Image: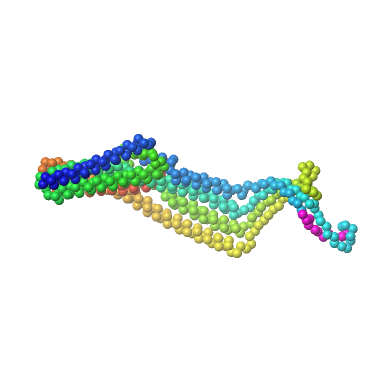
Amino acid sequence: MVLYGHHLDTIEMRKARFIIVFVFLFQASRLVAQKSSDTIVLAQVSEAIAYAKKHNIDKEIQSLQNDRSKSEYRLSKSYLLPNISGNFNAQNNLKLATTPIPGELVGQPGTLVNVQFGQDYNYNAGVTVTQTVLDWQNSMKSRTAKVGTQITQVQSELFDERLTEQIALYYYTSLIAQKALDISTKDLALADSILILTQEKFQNGLVDKSIWNQASINLNNIQQNLLSNRILWEQSLNQLKNLLGIPTGVALELHEAQSSFEHAFSATNELSMDKNIHLLALQSEQARLDIKQQRALYYPKLTLNAYFGQQQFQNDFTFSLDGNAWSDYSYVGLNVSVPIFTGFANHQKIKIAKIEKRIVDKSLEQEKRESILRDDLLLKEHSINLDALTSAHNNYLLYEDNVSLAHQKLQQGIISLETYFKVFEDYLKSENNYLNALSNLYSSYSTILSRKNDNNL
């Protein structure tokens, strides 16, 4: 019996060393992170959201896309301004064109005489101005591009909403995981003390091995919970750092007060309009303009052309800057282009555009209906989760008190270890229910936080 008891002591010593090493590594890793790098401290979720909007990489990309959309709209309006270009042209007429003229002009009546007009070398210098007077297609393109800038802006707002939701979710998940770590650490110390007590009773022959096994199982389960909570904490903190745009070598700490954390989930019935509805409404307007743009393919296009320049002609390869060597040459032209037949391509383009418009309108109609249902369900779930958390938290405190009382009774010999294990098992279940209820509540609250009318958090 003594030898077997010595074996048990060895096992418990290993477990104790494992716990000590685990706690030491956990604390050491935090100290190293604090000493070897800078640390960013956030005291509330609004600070995390504000930080992300300044440093999140995807947010910066979204901002650049907004700038690109505005530039594309300004580009689409360029057709309203004239195109002006300066040009200089030098031409060597290797063979002048031959033109037959009546012989009467050159003293040879009754015949046709082939003559060549012009000189071998021609020089032209001037300015060409082209102005679109009427172009319905480019006009529709510009109006469509303007709606495109509005769509990009709504997409940016929708991105901010989703970023806020993700930041809040991982922020509160980190806090919940930290809370779970604190509770598990306290449970671990309690389970370890019970295991030592059980081992003493087992060595003295007061309990059988199954009781000792149950105490070991309880300790192992809590150790697993501790490790799982540590993984969850590391993962949520890592995801939060990624969303915040924090470099790898910089540590992140959340120092939100416990009272603020526990009471941050006040219910609200004020949700901003679902931005997906606004987005689809703009896409519907864009589809309507696209139909007009395709119809504009049938409309005439009116362009004004003007050229203001001078010419110089030489019989040999010479070039003079003398003003007398140049002669004025200018013209103004009006061009009207009307499509007559395009192989029914324009007709099909209009047909496709109308179908796209109907698709977007149906999607908008469906989104409006689903949005109302989603918002209603979100608020109801949040209210239910709030009630569920209140009950779960009250039960957790009661079971925690029961464990404390049962531990005292066990030490006084009033109850058996089997009775204590049953109370402790119920306590662990209530603890798990409480943490799950807390997680469910903050999941719905993160979505509500992103949909608040005052979203400048």
Residue 241 versus residue 432: which sits nearer the camera?
241
Give the side of residue 382 with respect to residue 210, left or right.
Answer: right
Quarter that holds the C terminus: top left
Name the image quarter holding residue 456.
Answer: top left
Residue most toward the bottom?
343
Residue most toward the top?
35
> Who's the residue at 34% across and 36% down the image?
34
The residue segment tinted magenta is 94-104
Please tell me whether residue 99 belongs to the stretch shown in magenta: yes
Q: Is residue 22 visible?
A: yes
> Who's the residue at 66% across and 52% down the image?
303
Q: Can residue 415 be seen in this view?
A: no
Residue 414 location (% of width, % of height): 10, 43
Residue 208 location (% of width, % of height): 12, 49
Say if 191 sits above or below 352 in the image. Answer: above
Give the side of residue 79 with respect to residue 242, left or right.
Answer: right
Please tell me whether residue 17 belongs to the stretch shown in magenta: no
Residue 4 versus residue 390: which sits nearer the camera?
4
Give the side of residue 31 with respect to residue 216, left or right.
Answer: right
Instruction: Give the number of marks.
Output: 0
> Who's the residue at 51% across and 55% down the image?
287
Residue 215 location (% of width, % of height): 17, 47
Residue most toward the left?
205
What colour scheme has been applied to the protein in the rendered image?
Answer: rainbow
Give the side of residue 186 with respect to residue 317, left or right.
Answer: left
> Who's the residue at 13% across and 41% down the image?
411
